[in-house]
Amino acid sequence: MAREILRAGADVIKVATTGGVLSPTDDPRHTQLTPAELEVLVTEAAMQGRYVMAHAQGTEGIKNAVRAGIRSIEHGIYLDDEAIELMLANGTWLVPTLVAPVSVIRAAQAGASVPESAVRKSKEVIEVHVDSVRRAVAAGVKIAMGTDSGVGPHGTNLDELPPLMAGCGMSPGQVLAATTSSAAELLGYGDQFGRLATGYRADLAIVAGDAYELNHLAANVSQVWKNGQLVARDGQLV
């Protein structure tokens, strides 16, 4: 399957090493795929110069992914001290997606058709998720911003920044780096995106006022540039 996906032109392979919040018949703590299977995925991807990322919420599934050489852990809800130490030793990234379970609950409260099991599991994981991310941040695990957009509405991505990422002990500068240069580095585009530097792709968000005022960041975006071209001004496409 890894070879088939790579032949089809995938830039990255994503694997689920645990169950999930939205999965109707499993639990986030359930472990999926064996260490040997994960090692094969990483080997096949590496031969093509590609990375593997893991949807990993439960503790053992996270550790299996890290030990196999998977590049990033998406979610990381049930981190323990050993998992954090393994991530530090292997240089594994964490993409917390703290807004994802929040978005499930918001959708249900707004009247969307959301399975009861998903709402229940979202409520169960929120506090432990924040605690896990807070401990990972304090330990120095590399963090990149991600949101699971599609779980929540597209265009609400910045809800991940305040108070979620900042609330886990990240400074405004660290949050913005996770959202730009660190995210680009994780994806293997650190030499093209994510920084204001000569030779980099001019993808820019121009902010009125202080960019470190994360609570007002979305409202303060005045211009958006993509590859050197102005594409939006004051909330309107151009």
Image: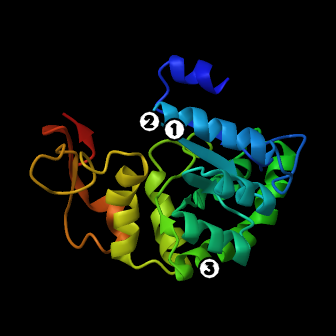
Give the amino acid type for the residue marked by disc 2 in the picture: Gly
Q: Is residue 112 visible?
A: no
Which image quarter: residue 44?
top right
The residue lying toward the viewer, choosing from 210 and 13, is: 13
Which image quarter: residue 32?
top right
Q: Closer to the camera: disc 3 or disc 2?
A: 2
Give the amino acid type for the residue marked by disc 1 in the picture: Ala
The alpha-carbon separation of the residues under discs 1 and 2 comes to: 5 Å
Label number found at residue 49: 2
Element at label 1: helix
Q: Estimate the x, y position of residue 24 in percent, counting from the top left.
A: 86, 40
Q: Dot 1: within a 10 Å radius of its alpha carbon, few (fewer than 14), some, or many (20 or more) residues? A: few
Q: Are marks 3 and 2 in contact (CB under 8 Å)?
A: no
Q: Quadrant of the N terminus?
A: top right
Label number found at residue 46: 1
Label number found at residue 135: 3
Q: Estimate the x, y position of residue 177 in percent, counting from the top left.
A: 34, 65
Q: Closer to the camera: disc 3 or disc 1?
A: 1
**Side of 21 where 180 appears, left or right:** left
Element at label 3: helix
Q: Reading the chain from its start, which is encountered first: label 3 or label 1?
A: 1
Q: Reading the chain from its start, which is encountered first: label 3 or label 2?
A: 2
The residue lying toward the viewer, choosing from 15 and 233, is: 15
Element at label 2: loop
Q: Estimate the x, y position of residue 48 in percent, counting from the top left.
A: 47, 30
Q: Is residue 223 visible?
A: yes
Q: What residue appears at the point 60 percent right and 66 percent down from the top-left corner?
A: 87
**Side of 59 where 193 appears, left or right:** left
Q: Estimate the x, y position of residue 236 in percent, counting from the top left.
A: 25, 40
Q: Are marks 3 and 1 in contact (CB under 8 Å)?
A: no
49 is higher (above) or lower (below) than 65: above
Q: Are marks 1 and 2 in contact (CB under 8 Å)?
A: yes
